[in-house]
Image (cartoon, grey):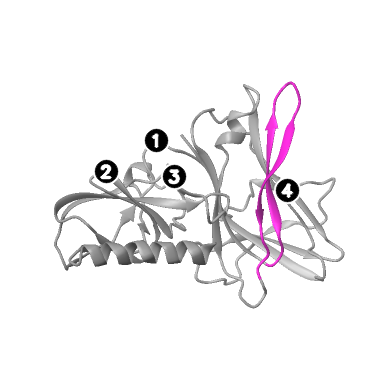
Amino acid sequence: MRVLLYLVLVGVLSACIKNNPNPSWIEVNPFVLVANPSLSGSEGQLSQDFRDVWLYIDDQMIGCFQTPFKIPILKEGNVNIKIYPAVRNNGIATDKKIYPFMNVYEINSKLVKDQTLTVNPVTSYVNNLNFWIEDFEDASIKIQDDPNTSLASLFISSDNLTPFNGFNYGKVVLTELDSVWVANTTEQLSIPKNKPCFIEVDYYNTNSFVQGFLALNTNGNIYQDNAGFNEQPFSTVKWKKMYIELTELIGNSTNGSNFIQTFKANLDSLQTETFICVDNIKIVYK
């Protein structure tokens, strides 16, 4: 399917060039995430995975592309360009959504036939956001192991896993003896309905694990597995980031509910010892 989509796109672009032999070109490099001074550091450490962007020219949608890219544009002259950071929602490559908490990169520029306009987009978190953050830089951890079911424990580690932001991260080691990890955030958050909400998680793992969602209210608690993190091979493991949308889950919950995030893992089959590292866990909402 991916190959077919690529061939279709190449065919369309080739046809555009053939029928319009002198297009303008636009080249877009990967986004850079910078701090928003108005937030006074409340957004925490600035890790990101905005490899995809939505491109608009004169408010006309051109498409979603993975950076860096260079494409022909059948326009010339003065134009307005908007580039929106996109995330792969719940880690799904086919669900590329404009991330609602980031500022759009907008410029007015000029497209010239047979010339390339190179754009280096920059973004930051928008104003007036709420953040719950666990970055493991404090001695106390805002994620607790379940004393009834968890055999493995989350602890703070500072082993060098570069390249990475910050000094510490959370780590769980799973073995045949300590083969189960179950944990949850300690603070119950009251998050408004009908407004966007995501949880961001940086992870470096050789064991799969699941992020879950627990709605607490006077009529009873409702738990739901939400997003899965696939294990990475020991030889190629690296830091990754996932953006997980909570908007619909919150919207479907009982009015007056408070919310807790959970994490759980079982030692993967055919393994004797694995690990899960997490960092920069952010619940972001308006």
Q: Earlier in the sequence, mark 4 or mark 2?
A: 2
Q: Is residue 265 left or right of residue 104?
A: right
SS under mark 2? loop
Q: Which mark is residue 183?
A: 4
Q: Earlier in the sequence, mark 1 or mark 4?
A: 1
Amino acid type at image mark 2: Asp
Q: In this orientation, does residue 28 appear?
A: no
**Callouts 2 and 1 close, C-beta under 8 Å:** no
Q: CA distance from mark 3 to mark 2?
A: 32 Å
Please name which of the two marks, 3 or 2, marks the residue nearer to the observer.
2
Placement of 129 over or under 167, stated as above or below: above
Q: CA distance from mark 1 to mark 4?
A: 30 Å
The image position of residue 10, as x and y in percent, is: 38, 66
Viewer-closest of 119 and 151: 119
Q: Which mark is residue 128?
A: 1
Hey, which quadrant is residue 224 in on the image?
top right
Q: Earlier in the sequence, mark 2 or mark 1?
A: 2
Q: Is residue 156 left or right of residue 33?
A: right
Q: Which residue is mark 3?
A: 42
SS under mark 1? loop
Q: Earlier in the sequence, mark 4 or mark 3?
A: 3
Please name which of the two marks, 2 or 1, marks the residue nearer to the observer.
2
Question: Mark 2 packing: few (<14 Cα in 10 Å), some, or many (20+)?
Answer: few
Q: Earlier in the sequence, mark 3 or mark 1?
A: 3
Q: Which residue is mark 2?
A: 59
Placement of 264 over or under 116, stated as above or below: above
